[in-house]
Amino acid sequence: MLSRLRAGSVALTCAAMLAAGPTVSSATATPTPATQAAAAPSLSVPATHTNPATTAPSSLASVSAMPGQSGQQVGVPVAPGLQPTRVTGSIALTGQPTGGTIRVSAQGRTLLEVPAMGIIALDAPVTADDLTDRQLVLALEYLPAVRDVCAAAQSTATLSGITVETQGTETAPTTVAEFLAPSVPAILIPVPAEPATDVSAAILAATAAMAHRYPDTVLNLVSEQDMNAQPAALPAGSRIITIAATDGTPSTKLGTQGGRPELTITGAGEDLRTSARALADTKSALADATTVTGMTSTVPAAAGPEQALTDLGSQSIRLAGYGSHETYLGVDQSQFGGPVSDLSLQLRGTHTAVPTGGQAALSVFWNDYLLSSQTLDGDSFDITADVPAGHIQSRNGLRIRLTALPAGGDCTGPAGLLPMELTVDTTGSKLTAQRGHSLKPGFERFPQVLGTTFPIAFDAGATAQQNTINAATLAFSLQRGNAALLDVRLTTPAALLDSSDSGLLVGATPATAEKAGAPLRLAGFRAVSSKDIEYGVGTSAPYGALQAFEQGGRNLLLLGGWAPDTSGAASGQATPGVLQASLVGYVQQQPGGWSSLSRNLLVTQTTGKPVLLETNAITPQAEVTDGFRPLAFWLAAAVVALILAAGTGVLLRRRHRRAARAFADAREQASSEEPAAEEAAGDTTRGR
């Protein structure tokens, strides 16, 4: 699915540029003009491309449409010099189809029009005339059936698995601006065997920049020693980005490697990192030379807690017709600049008059939870509703549904000539958030807890190359789900743990995991059985673990591994470093990316796929219980002191009661002896 428009832009400065060119923007639902290549030399790529791998991956290029919606668009890039010949894909209907027609078109030309039922195969010839600025933009429509009785449409059509066959010879870009095309299917970044700190920092910044600019692209991070066969395996239109540390002014230079366009960024220190981060800026169209110097950028401020629907990516919302019609808007917590604990919605707009004898209602759903529903009258509506905290996820969906019936319920007769229409004021309608957490600690708190700052620390549990590849891949996955560009910075484990920032620690050692207070210490453990999973890790089996937890009021991600000794590699077992890489690859390969993760622990052994767990399913580790021993000692001492104090109090109370009883007995005895003494004295007096 094409990305939403990203809020804000990044300021870009190029110290050396020849002339201003048209602005290049990231791929969105509405394609933007591409920079045209002029007199570009040919690349040595195959003349004919029929391998589906040469087109956008099916897990990324998809689009959904509901009955009655206007054409929902998805774009598949076609590299300059190549001509599309055929497009294929699959359309699946979910929910309760009520008939109708599925239509797929490009540039207004119908490629497919069939009845809406089951699984539909898309296989149609296409030409260069069907392209829009080097993209094959497909529009999917779900036309509802014409019925004599209004029926609710509860079905959705999804087009996925899109591939485009091409032929011809790919032409190379001639400027840095052309290198940063409107859309790119894949990006390859080589990582040196022993990267310097500033090179690793720049690679992290470059991966975040590319994920922000091309959220639908595929990222490949490989070691430099494995680069030979990599370029030829890339799909047409792919790009290679190489980062190297050199003295002098930062430079960005265009070239080729293995027949693929390559951009080499050189420099040192912070300048090298900011040059790599500048790749995210759509103003890079100004870089219309093969070499530019001084590319730099600034990260925009975080979004505020109040966002209009236009800020959230919905430029217009219009619902029309009788029966049931609805629209959908995705809403992520990161679009509010941070985690959210409460949300309130204000939805306003106008509608046509409800005909005499007719009925119309507007319903608003949040993650399939009914927020509000009201009968329409007059010509406008204004709905205010609060979203319950228990229904706020990291990624959410807002659905607006119009349900209308004409007098008599006949949707096709004369009443159908004057259908109900409703328009939402997307500028005046807004969502207002309150800062806080609606989710318990775990993977689902990311990326929104990062805001715009993402510190990453490398520990000694893996090599610098492994840490760079793992951290960059995770940063790419997290950036995909974050609305704003993340300012990725490289720091040390001590600095990260001493700060108050949420962040990522890769290659963690057992000592660092213990200092961080990770729920799972990097040592042997066993999982207990639960109703849905039973997973055991023996003391002789290495494992890798990615965990998300809260520590000191901030949230941390920790990637590490453990092995009982150093004999694992010799015996053929995977090392902790290899297992950490397998976890990172697993996250990258999930159809939903980072959003597919749940709970707070992802763990893998030498065999089997990674498993998501809750850390409370782990039996207490010795490292955890040992950490509580000093506390347990002081607790025991406190209990003993309390017992002694209580015992002393009991003894004192008993002693006090004995003394009080003796005193009372003495007084009673004294009071009984006084009358006897007085009587004896009286007798003596009478005797006299």
Image (cartoon, rainbow, N blue to C red):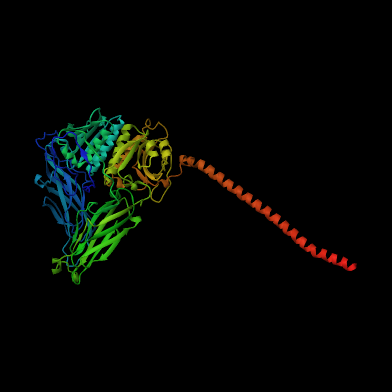
Apparent side of residue 222 relative to residue 636 in the rendered image (left or right) = left
Apparent side of residue 131 relative to residue 59 in the rendered image (left or right) = left
Q: Residue 30's x, y, as percent?
A: 17, 49
Q: Residue 256's x, y, as percent?
A: 17, 32
Give the image quarter of residue 508: top left
Residue depicted at x 30% and y 60%: 385
* Above or below for 439 versus 193: below
Residue depicted at x 28% and y 42%: 486
Q: How many marks?
A: 0
- Which residue is at the front of the view, 497 or 39? 497
Q: Residue 475's x, y, as percent?
A: 29, 40
Q: Is residue 151 among the parts visible in the rendering?
A: no
Q: Which part of the image, by quadrant, shows the C terminus?
A: bottom right
Q: Residue 495's x, y, as percent?
A: 38, 36
Apparent side of residue 643 relative to residue 103 in the rendered image (left or right) = right
Apparent side of residue 623 relative to residue 253 in the rendered image (left or right) = right
Q: Is residue 113 among the parts visible in the rendering?
A: yes
